[in-house]
Image (cartoon, rainbow, N blue to C red):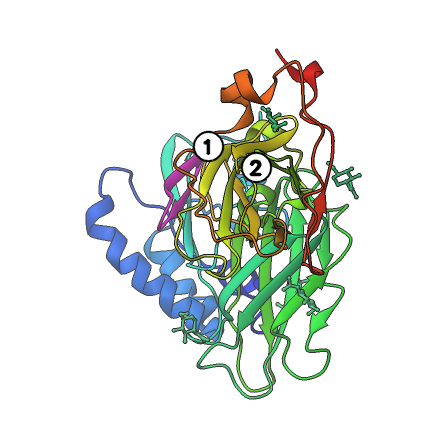
């Protein structure tokens, strides 16, 4: 069947590439490539016996199985000192040695959609032998899906999206396979979107088979033409999108306010030290995201941020977002939590320049005696919660 990985292997496998002396690669290589290309494009020409007669040397009959990523050759030639190479356009040459006397090399997962060339170098009956196998991506240019991307969200779901290749025939259908590179278990996408018509997305709710590194293969079929595949390797960490921080609450006494929030749930195990936060605290009439720049706060076991905010205070709202401390995109903003003052309080600027996180201001934040927290209740049904609570716990003093 054309268009499958297996078909490529079948077409490329029985190529009668004779060996050549190791000393003259430059002169022979272009001709070999042209020949290999010709053979791949025209499988009918795959058996060219006259070539074998021109170079009557041992042939290794190299084949590649993309499923197992194994490059194998004919054991009967008793080749010794074998070395295998994958000539990868981006990764360069990758060398693997076979185990013991095995007539096979197993390569690590690598994206193959750009086409690769394999080489086996060995000694057969005292002669150096070098055999190439071109492993192209079958099908016409532009038929593979484009703009393929995946992301893990809500700490346990995966969505992938892609677009039809610009040269893909009207009846093209795409299929997504995800393989855990550690367990080598492969699963097909259980739920494509749309369900009917050309698949351009995938939704996976059960991530239990997903690994830390995963091989994504997006191939396709069409009655009209062979469809090229696209493949990629992503770690779960690379593709996890952090959810916004949870449960943002604001407590105020008469002189200060304290914002607390919970870290996002993640699918990859992360600790509080892996997060950094931004707090966007704004007067409500100004609107979130305007004016005052956000405050940056490092992740703590208990995340909180205290700042002076004497009563009467203007109505304000805060929202929080999170990023990986090592970099990466910010999450969406949390739902805003509003905090307000007594009604009719005069407008009063909030000055995050003076605001300091609790931890660095233990003198006032962790003062041994606290006035009771006032009822800084919100006068209207605001979006978030406004709580009146005891002051910061003294037990957290380090
Ligand atoms: C797509 O890849 C899967 C998994 O390797 C394979 O089983 C299937 O036959 C391939 N389909 C096509 C059309 O190449
Ligand atoms: C490979 O080795 C086996 C056993 O040593 C021998 O019988 C066979 O003839 C050898 N084959 C070639 C092609 O030399
Ligand atoms: C892929 O994305 C790029 C940039 O967003 C866009 O210009 C292009 O049209 C997209 N390709 C397809 C096939 O949708
Ligand atoms: C993920 O895909 C599902 C199904 O297509 C969709 O309902 C959901 O909104 C998507 N989630 C995100 C965060 O894009
Ligand atoms: C939200 O945070 C407050 C204060 O930290 C806590 O009392 C409450 O239980 C939290 N709610 C949830 C659902 O965790
Ligand atoms: C409000 O709480 C802060 C932080 O705990 C504390 O330093 C301050 O003295 C309190 N203010 C009043 C008026 O009680």
Label 2 packing within 10 angstroms: few (<14), some (14-19), many (20+):
many
Q: Residue at x 61, y 30 (%)?
A: 272
Q: Which region of the structure is painted magenta?
A: 81-95
Judged from the image, the secondary structure of the residue bearing numbered disc 1 is strand
Q: Where does residue 283 sit, x and y in percent of width and height?
A: 49, 54
Q: Residue at x 58, y 22 (%)?
A: 365
Q: Residue at x 59, y 72 (%)?
A: 220
- Are the two marked residues, 1 and 2, in contact with CB atoms closer than 8 angstroms? yes
Q: Is residue 73 visible?
A: no
**Mark nearer the N terminus (1 vs 2):** 1
**Residue 103: mark in rendering:** 2
Q: Examine the structure image and report whether residue 85 is included in the region drawn in magenta.
A: yes
Q: Where does residue 242 sit, x and y in percent of width and height?
A: 59, 47
Judged from the image, the secondary structure of the residue bearing numbered disc 2 is loop
Picture quarter with ligand 4 = bottom right
Q: Where does residue 156 sit, x and y in percent of width and height?
A: 72, 49
The secondary structure that dominates the magenta segment is: strand
Q: Is residue 376 visible?
A: yes
Q: Nearer the viewer, residue 87 or 273?
A: 273
Alpha carbon separation for disc pair 1 and 2: 8 Å
Mark 1 Cβ and ligand 2 under 8 Å apart: no
Q: Examine the structure image and report whether residue 370 is included in the region drawn in magenta.
A: no
Give the residue pinned by disc 1. 82
Position of the N terminus by quadrant: bottom right
Q: Residue at x 51, y 21 (%)?
A: 361
Q: Nearer the viewer, residue 222 or 361?
A: 361
Compared with 347, 365 (above or below) is above
Residue 274, quarter of picture: top right
Instruction: Report the side of 367 relative to 39 (left or right).
Output: right
Position of the C terminus by quadrant: top right
């Amino acid at each position: 069947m054309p268009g499958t990985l297996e078909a490529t292997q079948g077409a490329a496998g029985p190529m009668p590439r004779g060996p050549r002396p190791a000393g003259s690669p430059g002169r022979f290589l272009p001709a070999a490539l042209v020949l290999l290309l010709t053979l791949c494009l025209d499988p009918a020409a795959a058996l060219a016996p006259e070539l074998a007669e021109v170079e009557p040397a041992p042939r290794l009959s190299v084949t590649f199985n993309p499923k197992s990523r194994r490059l194998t050759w004919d054991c009967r030639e008793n080749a010794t000192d074998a070395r295998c190479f994958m000539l990868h356009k981006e990764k360069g040459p990758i060398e693997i040695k076979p185990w013991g006397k095995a007539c096979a090399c197993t390569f690590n997962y690598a994206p193959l959609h750009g086409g690769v060339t394999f080489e086996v170098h060995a000694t057969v009956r005292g002669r150096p032998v070098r055999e190439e196998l071109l492993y192209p991506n079958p099908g016409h240019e532009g038929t593979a899906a484009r703009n393929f991307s995946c992301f893990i969200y809500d700490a346990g779901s995966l969505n992938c999206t892609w677009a039809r290749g610009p040269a893909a025939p009207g009846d093209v259908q795409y299929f997504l396979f995800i393989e855990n590179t550690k367990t080598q278990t492969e699963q097909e996408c259980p739920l494509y979107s749309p369900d009917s018509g050309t698949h351009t997305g995938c939704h996976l709710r059960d991530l239990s088979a997903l690994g830390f590194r995963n091989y994504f293969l997006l191939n396709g079929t069409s009655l009209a033409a062979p469809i090229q595949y696209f493949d990629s390797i992503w770690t779960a960490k690379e593709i996890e999108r952090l959810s916004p921080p949870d449960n943002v609450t604001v407590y105020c006494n008469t002189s200060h306010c304290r914002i607390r929030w919970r870290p996002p749930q993640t699918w990859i195990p992360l600790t509080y030290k892996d997060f950094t936060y931004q707090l966007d605290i704004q007067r409500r009439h100004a609107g979130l995201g305007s004016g005052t720049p956000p405050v940056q706060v490092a992740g703590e076991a208990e995340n909180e941020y205290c700042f002076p905010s004497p009563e009467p205070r203007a109505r304000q709202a805060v929202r929080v977002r999170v990023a990986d401390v090592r970099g990466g995109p910010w999450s969406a903003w949390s739902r805003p939590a509003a905090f307000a003052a007594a009604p009719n309080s005069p407008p009063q600027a909030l000055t995050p320049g003076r605001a300091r996180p609790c931890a660095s201001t233990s003198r006032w934040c962790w003062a041994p005696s606290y006035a009771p927290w006032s009822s800084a209740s919100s006068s209207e049904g605001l979006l978030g919660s406004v709580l009146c609570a005891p002051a910061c716990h003294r037990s957290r003093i380090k």
